[in-house]
Image (cartoon, rainbow, N blue to C red):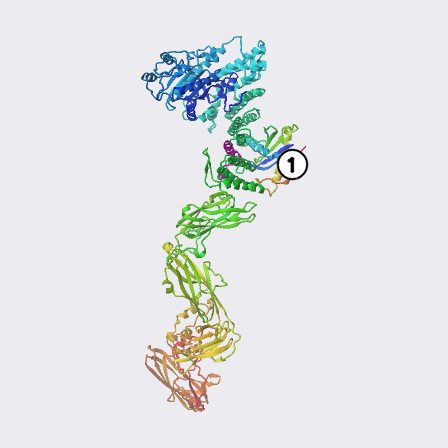
């Protein structure tokens, strides 16, 4: 259902990116890359107040002609971006939220691996499986 | 339909008057036109006198007529004024110019209110001063009239003439354009002049109003073509003033229209239409209420636009509201959108009023002015101030409507516009305007929504329009801080530059791609990329490799297509440099193949490249190909190393402390500051550890050191090839310093894949152990260099001991003990410096007590006499080697205690002791400038000398002879050489010594005078024995060796040598034999002198009288001496102690002599009475007590001298003992037999013994 799932480091370089129509991978790279602008803008507009709890889910970052780009930022500023087909009407905000939650959990599990150094590219098979499940669902 | 979108339009443009500035004719240079345009466009805001209104003007260089047709929909799209700029030299040219001006004017005639033609180049020379003047205006300058009348051309005064020429001009010269422009009514110039002076701009006479579509206007405003002449661009001081007047004239016309419309309540309404609507309303019933409403509404809206242009935004809003109400009823969506947009503009104009009527902003460039409202708005928003007061103050002062509503209204307007396909341009422009407003308000997310919308607007357009659209998007995105989006659109627009359906412009594409780099965290300067955390890029210093690779590839491709291979190579190098670690093996190969293909045509250089745009492309060193892991300079080879010549008093600079933790001398050697020195003129080396990061073999075509100054050093490059997966590989780079001083090594230079890179140390961040910026090494003046060789055979084994690093040659020799050999050492000067100083010394750790000097020696004078050595000159000196040995049997030191010598015994057990000497002969030399600077070099010759044993002296003894001057030395020699040996000794005797055989030889040797023995060597005996590596020579033996000459020859090996006796040691008894007495004895037995041949025989009981005469032959008197005469009984086994009962002494057998003066005599006699028969001897000795007195117990030391067994001649005195016994009673000194043993050899020196045997038989 999702077309592309990406994990982006705090410093905004990609840690993990997976697309399902792999033939047009580059397009998704561009899409995710440019979506970071919106993510940064959204974070910076909220983060002024130290006390207020920012919601991790950023919502729709921007729609493109065929896809919708959603964003999610963890408290450590690791970004998750999910690109979904805009024709897929079944995906509502709640579903996207659940997907991000799942992704976040998988990421945390992956991070618990003591051999993983934060900032490295993610090669965990477990994490990849979770992502693949998201991409291939229904 | 509209083709072009004005991407730079802002909301403020709605209130400005559009003036078209055109370039007419071909005479005027484009650059000059731009300068004139510049000047004109400075006048963008005019304060209308008396009206308190500020009119803004928008100048455009080109504006299609199709745009103009939208002027009814939005009046700011209407061209209201026309300024044509041209140049001509004479009248015919002017004619052409005027014709083209006319045609242009015709084109825009429907909307134009007024126009001007500015002509340069006239009135300078030969041109008529007074061109035909026309209705509207003439110059108000008085000097113009002056110039007219004088008919001379004042260069600085502008000449203005109306186009409709008056033939009856005051000027005498007829001008051709009079005929062409005969349309206009003709006025006399004087009249015109008056007019011009009287009515300043604004009230124009309406002579040419029939040309205009708006001629029905009620205002008296007339549009006329006015020609302004200037000699050139620099002499048009009042141009701005003219333009102001011109604009003011436009304003009055508009103002007139506005007032006219607002009071119009006529029934014959006309329907204002957007261009595409016109055909829809053909044949529509115009008499319906809705149509009337539509007309009314659109008119209202038009009025609102006019109000806005007339700087009355408040009124405009009212009109817009009314219009909206009217139009909403008839669902006229397009115009409703127009109303909304108009309201927005009015609100924005109210919220952000222009600060001042800017008349002259001379220091602002044209580009900046393109969007002055934004720029000003930004500064006015006060965001740059930290205190926030500006922001607050600004917001509170806003009288207009809430700006949040404005955004909503824009959204509404855009929604309405989007219903019409043909209104796409308007929609797009509205989006951009809204976006610009939001940027002002720093609402970036909302702004991005509008921008996103722009992308979706489907507008069939030309390629260059698309490029411009994407550029605009990119610019706006970067303004809202969306750097990635901006980069994306820059790249897209770059791609459109080279779209297949248009004429591709690769340089433009390249330029745009270059601008997009930053958004992808790329920079043309690789050093910026490695700043780490200080990085300015949006994606950290890593970025997205996949996208970066893509963009760089496109950049390289466009540079290549631009046919600028130099730049392509530079970018390809950057790609390889940056992307290498991210690429797969295949991609790496691909990239490197691409790079080498490019560099085939144009090799990469390490120089920065300047683009036409002024951008500098810094060099990209390929630091990773190969990766340098360590970089250090190597000291010269040990034998080439320069050392400071030690000055004698330079040792104690470090103070009194042997060790201090304070590093007083900062000699801490690091890699960046080595503790060694290089020598000028020598080839010096640096060692680099290289790593090949590729999966393929890496060929480095050139690799050399990079020094701070090329003049200072000569570089010897290397061209290593690093195989794949080879791990670290060490490469040595060589350099030859050319001058003394300091040399800075900055890094290294490589040529890899055709790219020359200057890799500086400061860029090598991965250098281990520590990064450094440069290495500074001291270079000392040139020193000579010697080659050393030796005639001796090369040593096969050389045990390197200690400081043997500088050994350059070796020699070995095998000697038998006692053998001597000679070797030639040759040194050759291989440098171009003189060798002025050469010192040779033996350098060995084992050289204790100088024993090596006995093995190896040379003649110093021989060397010094041959100095200096010229270039290629040689120096030879001999090295003498001697098989030094102690000739003693090892381990069991057989003490030569005389008696038990068994002649000719075979000593098979004698171990063969081989001695091997490793030593180093060091040559320290210097010369030339290096010597003056106090440096020298050292090279060494390793010597390996094996000393084989030849002969051992197993036993030795000394025997008395009758001659007091001589004694006999007996030696037992064993041949341990394994070869047959001929021994010759004592000048004439010789024997043959078979291997392992022992022979005894006897030699007559002179007795030694105690004085001639050098006892200083004895000092060394104080060294504890176990510290001594070898026995030291015995001083007596050394002395004795002068008289002993034992030579051996080995016929089988043709070796000859000597046997030395230096290491024989002697017992005190033997010493007594050896030493020459300085007392002369004369002994008489019973009155008969004792001669060697004399025989004595006594009877038992017979008195044996012994008379002794002592003569001191030495030069000094001897004090405190003790003369002893002791009898002893002798047997075959040796001396026996004498039973006192067997002998009696008559008189004193012991006499103390207080003083024996030099040359004086002492006489003494006593008698013995032997009581038993037997063989007896007498021991007569004189002891010197002087120095030994203190030691009481040993004062009288053992003084027995063994009587030599000899056959007693007269054994017929058996009764003499009894005689002696009878004498026993009356001896003053009874017994004086003292048998104290003492090993003190020193005493031997003070004891003189009568050496001849005193033997007799008592029967």
Q: Residues within 10 Å of mark 1 (few under 14, many from 20)?
A: some
Left or right? Give the position of B1238 relative to A130.
left
Does residue B880 lie above or below B50 as drawn?
below
Quadrant of residue B445 within the rendered picture: top right
State the residue at coordinates (41%, 60%). Answer: B828
Q: Position of residue B897 (x, y in %)?
A: 47, 78
- Residue range of the region highlighted in magenta in the rendering: B506-526
Q: Which residue is more in the foreground, B776 or B1138?
A: B776
Find disc 1 in the rendering and name its residue.
A132
Q: Position of residue B809 (x, y in %)?
A: 46, 61
Q: Position of residue B1118 (x, y in %)?
A: 35, 78
- Taking the view exactly as shown, the residue that stands out farthest to the right is A138
What secondary structure predominates along the stretch shown in magenta?
helix
Q: Secondary structure at mark 1?
A: helix
Does any portion of residue B616 appear in the rendered image?
Answer: yes
Does residue A105 lie above or below B739 as drawn?
above
Does residue B1035 lie above or below B877 as drawn?
below
Q: For residue B511: magenta?
A: yes
Does any portion of residue B346 appear in the rendered image?
Answer: no
Q: What chain letter is assigned to the residue under label 1?
A: A
Q: Position of residue B352 (x, y in %)?
A: 48, 22
Q: Which residue is more in the foreground, B1030 or B43?
A: B43
Q: Which residue is more in the foreground, B1172 or B304?
A: B304
The mark total stands at 1
Does residue B1193 lie above or below B488 as drawn?
below
Q: For residue B362: magenta?
A: no
């Amino acid at each position: 259902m999702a077309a592309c799932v990406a994990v982006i480091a705090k410093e905004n370089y990609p840690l993990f990116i997976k697309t399902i129509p792999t033939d047009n991978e580059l397009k998704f790279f561009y899409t995710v890359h440019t979506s970071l602008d919106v993510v940064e803008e959204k974070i910076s507009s909220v983060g002024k107040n130290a006390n207020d709890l920012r919601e991790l889910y950023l919502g729709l970052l921007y729609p493109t002609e065929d896809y919708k780009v959603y964003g999610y930022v963890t408290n450590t500023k690791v970004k998750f971006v999910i690109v979904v087909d805009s024709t897929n009407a079944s995906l509502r905000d709640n579903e996207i939220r659940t997907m991000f939650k799942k992704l976040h959990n998988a990421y945390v599990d992956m991070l618990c691996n003591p051999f993983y150094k934060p900032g490295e590219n993610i090669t965990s098979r477990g994490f990849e499986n979770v992502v693949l499940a998201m991409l291939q669902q229904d | 339909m509209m083709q072009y979108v004005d991407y730079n339009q802002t909301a403020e443009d709605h209130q400005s008057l559009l003036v078209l500035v055109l370039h007419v004719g071909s005479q005027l240079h484009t650059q000059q036109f731009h300068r004139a345009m510049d000047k004109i466009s400075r006048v963008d805001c005019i304060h209308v006198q008396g009206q308190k209104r500020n009119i803004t003007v928008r100048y455009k260089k080109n504006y299609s007529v199709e745009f103009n047709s939208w002027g009814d929909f939005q009046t700011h799209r209407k061209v209201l004024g026309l300024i044509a700029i041209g140049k001509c030299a004479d009248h015919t040219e002017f004619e052409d110019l005027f014709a083209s001006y006319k045609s242009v004017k015709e084109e825009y005639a429907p909307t134009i209110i007024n126009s001007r033609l500015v002509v340069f180049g006239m009135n300078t020379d030969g041109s008529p001063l007074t061109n035909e003047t026309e209705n509207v205006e003439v110059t108000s300058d008085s000097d113009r009239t002056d110039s007219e009348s004088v008919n001379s051309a004042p260069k600085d005064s502008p000449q203005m003439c109306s186009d409709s020429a008056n033939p009856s001009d005051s000027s005498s010269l007829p001008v051709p354009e009079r005929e062409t422009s005969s349309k206009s009514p003709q006025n006399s110039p004087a009249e015109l002049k008056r007019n011009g002076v009287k009515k300043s701009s604004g009230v124009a006479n309406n002579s040419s109003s029939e040309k205009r579509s708006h001629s029905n206007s009620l205002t008296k405003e007339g549009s006329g073509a006015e020609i302004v002449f200037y000699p050139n661009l620099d002499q048009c001081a009042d141009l701005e003033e003219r333009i102001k007047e011109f604009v003011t004239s436009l304003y009055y016309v508009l103002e007139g229209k506005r007032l006219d419309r607002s009071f119009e309540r006529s029934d014959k309404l006309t329907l204002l239409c957007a261009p595409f609507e016109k055909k829809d309303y053909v044949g529509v019933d115009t008499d319906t209420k809705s149509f009337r409403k539509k007309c009314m509404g659109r008119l209202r809206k038009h009025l609102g636009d006019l109000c806005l242009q007339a700087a009355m935004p408040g009124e405009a809003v009212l009109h817009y509201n009314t219009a909206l109400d009217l139009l909403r009823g008839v669902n006229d969506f397009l115009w409703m959108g127009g109303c909304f947009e108009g309201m927005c503009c009015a609100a924005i104009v109210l919220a952000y009023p222009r600060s001042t009527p800017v008349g002259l902003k001379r220091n602002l460039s044209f580009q900046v002015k393109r969007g002055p409202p934004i720029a000003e708005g930004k500064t006015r928003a006060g965001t740059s101030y930290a205190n926030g007061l500006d922001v607050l103050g600004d917001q509170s002062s806003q009288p207009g409507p809430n700006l949040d509503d404005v955004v909503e209204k824009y959204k509404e307007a855009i929604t309405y516009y989007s219903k019409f396909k043909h209104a796409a341009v308007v929609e797009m422009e509205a989006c951009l305007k809204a976006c610009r407003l939001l940027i002002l308000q720093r609402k970036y997310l909302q702004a991005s929504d509008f921008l996103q919308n722009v992308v979706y607007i489907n507008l069939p357009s030309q390629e260059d329009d698309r490029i411009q659209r994407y550029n605009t998007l990119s610019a706006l995105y970067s303004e809202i801080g969306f750097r990635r989006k901006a980069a994306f659109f820059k790249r897209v627009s770059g791609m459109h530059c080279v779209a297949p359906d248009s004429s591709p412009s690769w340089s433009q594409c390249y330029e745009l791609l270059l601008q997009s780099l930053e958004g992808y965290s790329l920079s043309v300067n690789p050093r910026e990329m490695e700043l780490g955390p200080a990085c300015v890029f949006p994606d950290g210093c890593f970025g997205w490799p996949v996208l970066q690779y893509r963009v760089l590839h496109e950049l390289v491709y466009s540079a290549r297509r631009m046919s600028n291979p130099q730049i392509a190579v530079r970018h390809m190098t950057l790609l390889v440099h940056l992307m290498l670690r991210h690429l797969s093996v295949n991609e790496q190969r691909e990239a490197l193949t691409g790079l080498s293909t490019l560099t085939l045509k144009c090799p990469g250089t390490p120089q920065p490249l300047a683009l036409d745009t002024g951008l500098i492309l810094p060099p990209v060193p390929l630091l990773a190909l190969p990766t340098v892991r360590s970089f250090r300079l190597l000291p010269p080879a040990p034998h080439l190393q320069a050392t400071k010549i030690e000055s004698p008093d330079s040792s104690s600079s470090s103070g009194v402390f042997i060790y201090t933790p304070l590093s007083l001398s900062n000699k801490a050697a690091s890699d960046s500051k080595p503790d060694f020195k290089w020598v000028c003129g020598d080839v010096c080396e640096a060692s680099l550890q290289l790593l090949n990061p590729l999966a393929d073999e890496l060929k480095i075509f050139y690799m050399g050191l990079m020094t701070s100054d090329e003049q200072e050093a000569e570089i010897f490059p290397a061209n290593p090839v690093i195989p794949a997966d080879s791990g670290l590989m060490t490469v040595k780079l060589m350099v030859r310093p050319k001058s003394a001083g300091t040399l800075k090594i900055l890094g290294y230079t490589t040529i890899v894949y055709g790219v020359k890179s200057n890799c500086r140390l400061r860029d090598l961040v991965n250098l281990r152990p520590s990064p450094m910026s440069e290495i500074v090494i001291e270079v000392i003046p040139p020193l000579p260099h010697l080659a050393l060789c030796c005639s001796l055979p090369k040593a096969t084994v050389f045990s390197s001991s200690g400081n043997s690093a500088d050994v350059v040659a070796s020699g070995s020799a095998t000697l038998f003990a006692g053998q001597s050999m000679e070797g030639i050492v040759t040194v050759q000067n291989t440098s171009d410096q003189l060798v002025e100083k050469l010192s040779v010394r033996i350098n060995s750790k084992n050289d204790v007590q100088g024993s090596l000097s006995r093995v190896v020696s040379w003649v110093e004078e021989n060397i010094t006499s041959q100095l200096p050595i010229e270039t290629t000159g040689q120096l030879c000196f001999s090295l003498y080697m001697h098989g030094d040995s102690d000739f003693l049997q090892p381990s069991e030191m057989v003490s030569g205690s005389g008696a038990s010598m068994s002649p000719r015994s075979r000593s098979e057990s004698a171990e063969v002791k081989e001695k091997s000497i490793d030593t180093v002969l060091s040559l320290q030399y210097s010369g030339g400038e290096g010597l003056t600077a106090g440096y020298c070099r050292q090279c060494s010759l390793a010597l390996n000398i094996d000393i084989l044993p030849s002969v051992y002296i197993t036993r030795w003894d000394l025997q008395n002879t009758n001659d007091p001057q001589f004694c006999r030395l007996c030696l037992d020699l064993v041949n341990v050489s394994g070869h047959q040996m001929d021994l010759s000794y004592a000048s004439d005797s010789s024997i043959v010594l078979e291997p392992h055989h022992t022979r005894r030889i006897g030699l007559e040797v002179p007795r030694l005078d105690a004085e001639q023995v050098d006892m200083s060597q004895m000092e060394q005996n104080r060294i504890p024995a176990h510290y001594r590596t070898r026995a030291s020579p015995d001083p007596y033996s050394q002395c004795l060796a002068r008289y002993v000459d034992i030579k051996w020859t080995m016929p089988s090996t043709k070796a000859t040598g000597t046997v030395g006796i230096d290491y024989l040691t002697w017992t005190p008894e033997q010493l007594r034999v050896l030493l020459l007495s300085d007392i002369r004895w004369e002994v008489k037995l019973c009155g008969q002198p004792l001669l060697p041949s004399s025989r004595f025989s006594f009877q038992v009981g017979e008195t044996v009288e012994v008379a002794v005469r002592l003569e001191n032959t030495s030069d000094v008197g001897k004090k405190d001496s003790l003369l002893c005469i002791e009898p002893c009984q002798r047997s075959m086994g040796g001396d026996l102690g004498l039973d006192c009962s067997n002998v009696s002494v008559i008189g004193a057998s012991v006499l103390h002599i207080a003083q024996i003066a030099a040359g004086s005599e002492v006489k003494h006699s006593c008698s013995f009475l032997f009581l038993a028969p037997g063989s007896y001897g007498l021991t007569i000795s004189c002891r010197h007590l002087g120095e030994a007195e203190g030691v009481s117990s040993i004062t009288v030391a053992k003084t027995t001298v063994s009587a030599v067994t000899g056959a007693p001649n007269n054994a017929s005195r058996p009764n003499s003992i009894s005689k002696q016994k009878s004498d026993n009673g009356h001896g003053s000194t009874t017994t004086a037999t003292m048998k104290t043993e003492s090993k003190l050899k020193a005493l031997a020196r003070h004891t003189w013994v009568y050496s001849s045997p005193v033997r007799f038989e008592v029967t």
